[in-house]
């Protein structure tokens, strides 16, 4: 089977449509913003449109003209604040209606799957996350092959 890579603006519009129809979607994530829990090239994620968005969920959301897959760090009325686990600063604020789906499963390249955690401890470690991520990245560079 030939691998086809679609630009995010094409692929994610279709993903959002499928999720709105009630379908689950399995998607390979891009980028490093969800390190250390979701890694490009090592994981895929299963998304589902949930009735409710909770603090700690990992969601795919429209953000401006693009999409982000980040963790919910706050829900205030109809506004959701997102931040990537691998990010040290910067958040995105989106409307609850901009949330397309929630990550319900993280699948590694061997087919093993796990339910995503709510990231409670990781969020509390934000003041020292810089150092933890630095150690994590060095460790993976030295000892883990992509």
Image (cartoon, rainbow, N blue to C red):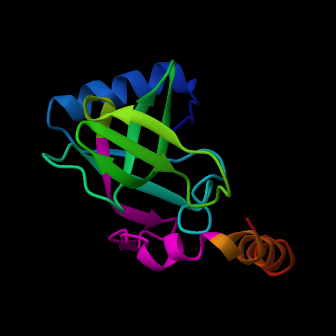
Query: Along the horizontal axis of the image, is 121 left or right of 61?
Result: right
Q: From the viewer's perspective, is residue 68 above or below residue 115?
A: above
Q: Residue at x 39, y 53 (%)?
A: 72
For residue 20, above or below residue 83: above
Residue 112 % position (x, y): 41, 74
Residue 124 falls within the magenta-colored stretch: yes
Pick whichever, 66 or 46, lies toward us: 66
Tell me: 115 left or right of 38: left
95 to the left or right of 7: left
Q: Residue 108: image x %, image y %?
A: 49, 67
Q: Nearer the viewer, residue 101 or 83?
A: 83
Q: Residue at x 54, y 62 (%)?
A: 38
**What is the tally of numbered marks visible in this picture?**
0
Query: What quarter of the picture does the C terminus occupy?
Result: bottom right
Write down the quadrant of residue 12 in the picture.
top left
Asked if the stretch drawn in magenta spans residue 86, the answer is no
| 89, above or below 66, in the image | below
Q: Residue at x 59, y 62 (%)?
A: 42
- In this picture, residue 87 sits left or right of residue 71: right
Q: Residue furthest front?
A: 76
Q: Which residues are magenta?
A: 101-126
Q: Position of residue 76 (x, y in %)?
A: 29, 46
Q: Position of residue 32 (x, y in %)?
A: 66, 53
């Amino acid at each position: 089977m030939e691998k086809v890579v679609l630009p995010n603006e094409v692929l994610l519009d279709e993903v959002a449509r499928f999720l709105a129809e009630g379908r689950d979607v399995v998607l390979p994530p891009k980028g490093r913003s969800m390190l250390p829990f979701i890694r490009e090239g090592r994981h895929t994620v299963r998304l589902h449109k949930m009735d409710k968005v909770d603090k700690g969920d990992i969601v795919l959301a429209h953000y401006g003209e693009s999409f982000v897959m980040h963790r919910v760090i706050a829900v205030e009325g109809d506004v959701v604040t997102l931040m990537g686990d691998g990010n040290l600063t910067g958040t995105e604020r989106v409307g609850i209606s901009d949330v397309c789906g929630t990550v319900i499963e993280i699948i590694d390249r061997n087919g093993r799957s796990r339910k995503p955690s709510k990231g409670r401890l990781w969020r509390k470690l934000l003041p020292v996350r810089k150092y933890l991520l630095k150690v994590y990245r060095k460790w993976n560079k030295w000892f883990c092959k992509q």
